């Protein structure tokens, strides 16, 4: 069973962003499956890098849309993104240095952050952008 499955409750009603969120779920599931099948550390590190890179690309997409239309909560939204990237990058470094393992607490953190962020802050800009004609 995947760690997280896409349902409409995660939709922000903007196709490009929904597709990227699906991509993030897929990478999180890939990481979870690799961990579950006891893949080597190097494989896990590779998937973790993919997840970090994809997340950065995705945040840039969201921020580009919000900037373009002067979204009022842009600054706080960017702060949320930055805090997440910082936390995941710190973990990634510790993982690569062999000082941390990919345990359930980090997977749970990634999962719950993503769910809460999409269903809170991301869903908040959906209607704002829809009104500007972005869909
Ligand atoms: Fe976001």
Image: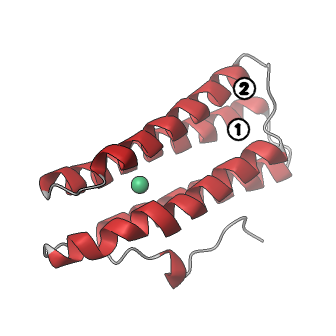
Point out which mark residue 95 bears.
2
The answer to whether residue 102 is above or below residue 92 is below
Where is residue 2 shown, x and y percent of the image? Answer: 72, 68
Q: Which image quarter is the C terminus in? A: bottom left
Task: Judge whether 42 appears above or below 25 on screen.
Answer: above
Residue located farthest toward the top when viewing the structure as drawn: 97
Check residue 55 in the rendering and tell me which mark sits there, or answer none. Answer: none
Question: Residue 45 sits in which quadrant?
Answer: top right
Q: Quadrant of the N terminus?
A: bottom right
Q: Nearer the viewer, residue 128 or 9?
A: 128
Please name which of the two marks, 1 or 2, marks the residue nearer to the observer: 2
Q: Pick whichever, 79 or 48, lies toward us.
A: 79
Real-space Cα separation, disc 1 to disc 2, in angstroms: 9 Å
Residue found at x 31% / y 66%: 16
Count neighbours of disc 1 (C-alpha within 10 A) and say few if under 14, some if 14 to 19, many if 20 or more: many
Question: Residue drawn at (67%, 29%), measured in percent from left and top?
Answer: 91
Report which quarter residue 79 is drawn in: top left
């Amino acid at each position: 069973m995947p760690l997280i499955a896409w349902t409409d409750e995660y939709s922000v009603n903007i196709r490009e962003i929904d597709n990227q969120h699906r991509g993030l779920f897929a990478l999180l599931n890939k990481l979870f499956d690799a961990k579950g099948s006891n893949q080597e550390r190097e494989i896990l590190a590779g998937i973790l890098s993919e997840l970090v890179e994809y997340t950065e690309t995705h945040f840039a997409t969201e921020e580009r849309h919000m900037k373009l239309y002067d979204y009022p909560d842009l600054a706080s939204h960017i702060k949320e993104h930055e805090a997440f990237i910082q936390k995941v990058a710190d973990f990634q470094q510790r993982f690569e240095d062999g000082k941390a393992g990919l345990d359930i607490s980090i997977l749970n953190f990634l999962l719950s952050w993503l769910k809460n962020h999409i269903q809170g802050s991301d869903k908040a800009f959906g209607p704002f952008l829809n009104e500007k004609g972005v869909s």
